[in-house]
Image (cartoon, grey):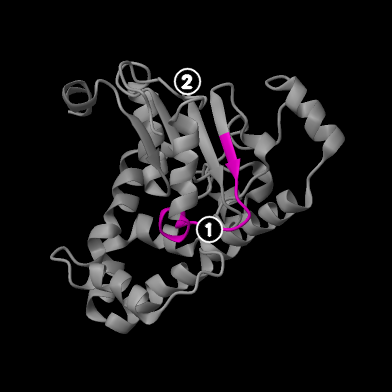
């Protein structure tokens, strides 16, 4: 269906996504890359983590859905796979910002990812609880709005709007939880399977994202655009919309590294 829509409507689109949009966007790039998807951009680093971030629970359960391991996609540069990056990493070490990013990542893995395990294993139980209590739903969402952003000044109307989308929808709060369960039930190794793409990709770094790894860990031959921001978090499209859109314009616009990837299209100005 995607390939048919791509041919009819776009002649081959480019994609952008964060959070689950990151995984969906990356999967589109991997499966339909070059033929139906010409380039992709994300503002979220991979959930695939290196061994040093494994908790004791993960060591006893290597298939734990929220802590998967891939040496090549998210770990310090390997001397065989990336010798130049390995030497650079060895000589330069980590910058202060990268150290803060690693601390942020460890915090999320060890203290902030319990929701993922619950939603990936017992979503309906949680769904009934959230549908039964507006205060419970507010608490479940509000902690993430606060912890996952970079000091964003939420006002009451904004918070209640976010919560109301879940509370008043016909499907209810449980609908947003099902993707965690269904994805990992069908493919526990989904993050590893989506690890490699070949079409041009771009990345925007925001310091309060959930996974904030050193840039050298994620360098890839097809990475054509990078942008580092001084503030911003997980909800970049909401918290920093102008910055995110600006990155897309620089990546796909005239003189950008992905300009003209879609035949017959002149890009964004």
Local SS, label 2: loop
Relative vertical location of residue 1 with respect to residue 205 in this rendering, above or below: above
Q: Residue at x 58, y 21 (%)?
A: 221
Q: Which mark is residue 223?
A: none
Residue 204 spot, x, y in % from top left: 54, 43
Q: Residue at x 39, y 78 (%)?
A: 139
Local SS, label 1: loop
Q: Nearer the viewer, residue 70 or 137?
A: 137
The reply to whether residue 189 is visible in this rendering is no
Instruction: Indicate left or right for 163 with 215 as reference.
Output: left
- Decide which of tag 2 and tag 1 comes sooner along the chain: 2
Residue 77 spot, x, y in % from top left: 71, 30
For label 1, the crowd category at 10 Å Cα-Cα, with few meaning under 14, some 14 to 19 and many 20 or more, is: many
For label 2, the crowd category at 10 Å Cα-Cα, with few meaning under 14, some 14 to 19 and many 20 or more, is: some
Distance (Cα) linking label 2 and label 1: 27 Å
Q: Quadrant of residue 122?
A: bottom left
Relative vertical location of residue 174 with respect to residue 61 in this rendering, above or below: below
Q: Quadrant of residue 193?
A: top left
Q: Which mark is residue 198?
A: 2
Residue 201 spot, x, y in % from top left: 49, 29
Q: Which mark is residue 233?
A: 1
Residue 13 spot, x, y in % from top left: 31, 27
Circles 2 and 1: CB atoms closer than 8 Å: no
Q: Residue at x 82, y 41 (%)?
A: 93
The reply to whether residue 17 is visible in this rendering is yes
From this viewpoint, which residue is outermost toward the right? 91
Which residues are the magenta region?
Answer: 226-240
Instruction: Indicate left or right for 139 with 175 as reference.
Output: right
Q: Quadrant of the C terminus?
A: top left
Q: Residue at x 67, y 53 (%)?
A: 101
């Amino acid at each position: 269906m995607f390939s048919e829509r791509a041919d009819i409507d776009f002649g081959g689109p480019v994609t952008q996504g964060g959070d689950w949009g990151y995984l969906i966007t990356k999967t589109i790039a991997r499966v339909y890359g070059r033929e139906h998807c010409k380039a992709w951009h994300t503002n979220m680093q991979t959930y695939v983590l290196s061994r040093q971030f494994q908790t004791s629970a993960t060591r006893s359960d290597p298939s734990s859905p929220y802590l998967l391991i891939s040496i090549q996609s998210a770990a310090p540069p390997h001397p065989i796979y990336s010798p130049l990056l390995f030497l650079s990493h060895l000589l330069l070490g980590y910058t202060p910002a990268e150290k803060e990013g690693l601390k942020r990542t460890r915090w999320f893995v060890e203290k902030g990812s319990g929701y993922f395990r619950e939603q990936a294993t017992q979503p309906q139980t949680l769904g009934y609880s959230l549908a039964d209590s507006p205060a419970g739903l507010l608490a479940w969402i509000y902690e993430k709005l606060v912890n996952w952003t970079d000091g964003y000044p939420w006002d009451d109307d904004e918070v209640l709007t976010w919560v109301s989308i879940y509370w008043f929808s016909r499907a209810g709060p449980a609908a947003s939880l099902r993707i965690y369960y269904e994805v990992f039930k069908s493919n526990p190794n989904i993050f590893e399977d989506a690890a490699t793409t070949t079409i041009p990709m771009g990345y925007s770094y925001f310091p309060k994202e959930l996974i904030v790894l050193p840039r050298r860990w994620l360098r890839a031959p097809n990475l054509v655009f990078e942008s580092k921001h001084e503030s911003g978090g997980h909800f970049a499209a909401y918290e920093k919309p102008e910055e995110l859109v600006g990155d897309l314009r620089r990546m796909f616009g005239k003189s950008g590294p992905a300009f003209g990837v879609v035949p017959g299209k002149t890009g964004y100005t």
